[in-house]
Structures are given as C-alpha cells and as structure tokens.
Image: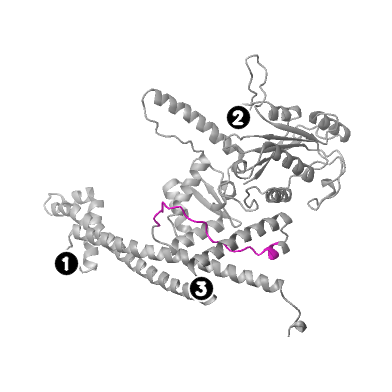
Amino acid sequence: MATIKHLTSKNSNYAAAESYLTFQHNEYTGLPILDEKGRPKLRDSYLLDTLECGESSFAMACLIANRKYGKNGGREDVKTHHYIISFDPKDAVENGLTMERAQALGLQFCKENFPGHPAIVCTHPDGHNSAGNIHVHIVIGSLRVRTVERQPFMDKPCDWEAGKKHRCTSAMLRHLRVAVMEMCEQADLNQINLLEAQGDHVSEREYWAQRRGQRRLDHANAKLAAEGQQPTQTVYQTELDKLRKQIYAVLNKTTTFEEFSALLMQKHGIAVKESRGRLSYCPPGRTKFITAKKLSKKLEKEQVLTVLSQNIQLAVTIQPSSEKKPDKIRKLVDIQANVAVGKGIGYERWAKKFNLKRWSQTLCLLQEKKLLSEDALHQRIAELQTQHDDALAVVKDLDARMVSLKELRGHLVVYRQYKPLAQKLQTVRNPAKFKEQHRAELAVYEAACAYFKANGLRTLPDLKKLDAEYQALSSEKNGFYTRYKKAQIELRELRTAQQNVEAFFRKEERSHAVPQQEVK
C-alpha cells in the first residue's frame, strides 16, 4: 500500500534538503554521519533527479526565484514542501517494483502535480523501520518559477501563476491521495483507500518519540541482561499510545456512553467531553484536552457509539479464534452515486477494481454453499435467521441464570466469612464499640441475610454444588453461543452476497435497458 506524507521546512539553507537525501544522517538526531576523516558519508544507494532547475542546482534555482519575486525573506516563511511516497514492502517481491521504476513514478507524479516548482525527486531503497519499503522523496521550492496550464485540481489563480507560493490545503492533500491511488492502480501495485482514515493517528512527533524511547529502553535492557537481570519492559509506549490502549480497554467493556465516561475516570482518571459533536480526552496530569482526531478515528463519537451499541447486542464474551479468518464479503460500491457527489477518476478506478474482487468473492461463496438460485438463497437466509434467534434467546436465558448464581454465590461466601463476626457481636462486653469497629463487614453480612430472606432461602445451598451448576451452565452457554456466532457470521455473509447480487443485476438492467417502443 502506498502512502503519502507532507512536511514543511522554514530552513533558508536550500542545499540542506539535497544533503539530507544524498548523505547518511543519524535518524534520531538528524546530524550527518561522518567517516574517519570527518567528512559526511554518502548513502549506500539512492537515485536523484531535479526538475524545473535549468542549468542551476535546486538551491540556486530557489534563491533566484526568491530574489526575482521578492518572497521567502521572512524567518517564518515556508521555504520548501517535502512529500514522501512510501510503497508497500511487498511490491518489490510481488509486483517487481525497483528503485528505477519507483524513481520514474515519482518523476511523473511530480510533473503532473507540482508543475512550475523547482524540485528534487530522490528514491531510497528502505525506510527508518528497515521494513524494505522503497520510498520516493519529492522536495519542491515553495515558489512557482513559471506560469503553468491550469489543471482540474487548481481552483485559484495562485495555483498556476508564476511567483505564487504552493498551497498544501486539505483539498490539495485529498487530490494527492487520489493521485497516489491512481498511480498504483495503473502500475499494478498494492494500494488501500487513502480517502478513509486507517486506524490510529500517529504524528511525526509521536513516531520519533516512540523510536527514541525504544532505543533508550533497548540500551537499558542490554545492561540488565549483561548483569543477569530480567527486563520488566521490552516495548516502549508513548503517552498517547498508553492513552489509546486505556480507552480501548474501557470501550470494549461498556454498553452506554455514561458508563464509558464514568469507568474511564474511575479506572484511569481520564476525562471525556463532547463539544460540537466531537469527543476529546484529557488524561491525568494534563489540563488541555486531546481531540479524538489526534488519537484515532476509532475514538471519534460516531465510532464510539457504534461500538457501544454492538456491545449491547453482543453482551457475551467472544472467544478469540486461532484459525486464520477468510476475507469478509463486503458490499459493492455504488460508483455512479459516489462520482455524482464529486469523487474523482482515481476513486472510480479504485472502486471498479474493488467491486470486481468483491463480486468474485460473492460468486465463490454462492457456489461453495450451492445457493445459485434466488429461492435457495432466500430459504437459507430464513433458516439461518431462525437458528440465530433461537440460539441467542437460549444464550440470554443461560446468561441470566449464571448471573443469578454468581450473585447467590457471592452472598453465600460473604455470609460464611462474616457469620463468626456476627455471632461474636452477641457476646462482647461493648457491642456498640465492636459494631463501630467492624461496620463494613457487618453491613455486607446483613445484606447477605436480607438477600436470602428476600429469595425465600431457608436452607443455604452447598458452595461446591453451586460451582458445579455454574460450570454446567457455562458449558451449555458456550455451545449455544458457538451456534449463534456461526449462524450470525454465515447470515451476515449471505445477506451481503444477496445485496451484491441485487445491486449487480440492477446495474445490468440499467446498462441493457431499451426504449419501450422497441419491445415486442
């Protein structure tokens, strides 16, 4: 999957950009790595080209443009924009991606999306994390040196006129993501939908904080290992990462927003607030709230409420499966509707490939289940719905009985534990003082006695028999829950397949529609 990242620089030393791309630098400090003679060491492998620089270097072309148009003289002016396109590590093995091919793609991408700007295009064979991901750096001077032909993604004269500065707006970033998707589609490279947020949001600052913290932790663990001690922590977590995990842990256990916010404050001291339909979180030790957007898309209001509603529907523990799960059948995308609301050509090409894969999965599923007729599919869905509802009803009934047994067992344990204390109260010389000293213990003992009386339990059950009955109910519940879950998964797949079939044939009917007068 190719991704694109944008950085800005206010450094007036334009040669520093080319130096960073061609010489080795310490990834933590950013300082150049020197050889034994004190000279910067070249990178082991890279490809570099310049665009719109003429006979000059990139740095000289930028300085000439600044002097010609009288701009970028301020300390706070953005001098360069740095875009990084990182390709999927699997592309090198599966799709034949080489540095030369990546460099050619980067040059073409730069010509199409940053015309008129002095630029450096440089390809490196690997990233900071040594994952083997080929990536392309595109560094452009912020000033455009010539007027260019207006492109569809340019909406203001400053986007194509000479002497104007590059604007990296949200609309521009959206266009660039679509352009990356389109580029990978044409080059047959792995790609995901960049228009939708993917998982946690890790900023550049947090990424490097985690890298530096992990490095310090590794050094400390190495010293402990040399001394024969066992390290207590092997993976470094940033404060934001800890905050995410704490919120996720509470979110998966709760069913209402009130319970979610209360449990977060009770267990971790994290405050939650909603403002203008958006959630923010404040961990202990901070006064400023952190927006959900800076943490993860999964922690925004809509996603949180969705998870809470799912927890209500599935109020049982889901046992993790060690088996590899197959790809889920997903719905076909309505390409025409999305294009009508403004989606570009890149999205349309990605969606066509997406629909082709999903339609193939749908056909394979229906052939595997031998449900190639509409009646057979409807009948199977009805059968699964009945199995699903029946199993869920039994699971809920058994779960209620288990909750009741658990409550009875808790009162029984408390009663037996504090009964000697209640008997001693009858024999002590100063009952008032003794009662004051053991107020909490006597209170829970009296609550247990009240529970037995309210439920008409004159003879208390045996604790071992209660445990055995609870285990039997748990085993029976797990069996019905397995049936329920199996029916639910198959039902969801077949309903999605049914919707895909209906959508496909609606599309076929539209494409093969003929005028009414021609029908005989």
Asked whether 375 falls inside the magenta stretch, the response is: no
Task: Name the residue that disc number 1 marks.
Answer: 458
Query: Secondary structure under badge 3?
Result: helix
Where is residue 122? Give x, y as percent.
71, 34
Per the rendered image, the range of residues in magenta is: 318-338
Check the picture and name the quadrant holding the C terminus.
bottom right
Of circles 1 and 3, which is in front? 3
Q: Residue furthest left?
A: 427
Q: What residue type is labelled 3?
A: Leu
Q: Which colour scheme is used?
A: one colour
Task: Name the residue that disc number 2 marks.
Answer: 27
Q: What residue type is labelled 1?
A: Arg
Q: Do the residues labelled 1 and 3 touch (CB within 8 Å)?
A: no
Image quarter of residue 81? top right
Residue located 52% across and 64% down the image: 365
Where is residue 239? Give x, y as percent.
51, 39
Query: Secondary structure under badge 1?
Result: loop
Where is residue 176? Give x, y as percent.
72, 48
Earlier in the chain: of badge 1 and badge 3, it is: 3
Q: What residue type is labelled 2?
A: Glu
Distance of mark 2 from mark 3, alpha carbons? 57 Å
Distance of mark 1 from mark 3, alpha carbons? 56 Å
Q: Residue 211 carries which label?
A: none
Q: Residue 377 carries which label?
A: 3
Query: Secondary structure under badge 2?
Result: loop
Is residue 455 placed above or below 158 in the rendered structure? Answer: below
Q: Which of 290 and 506 is in front in this view?
A: 506
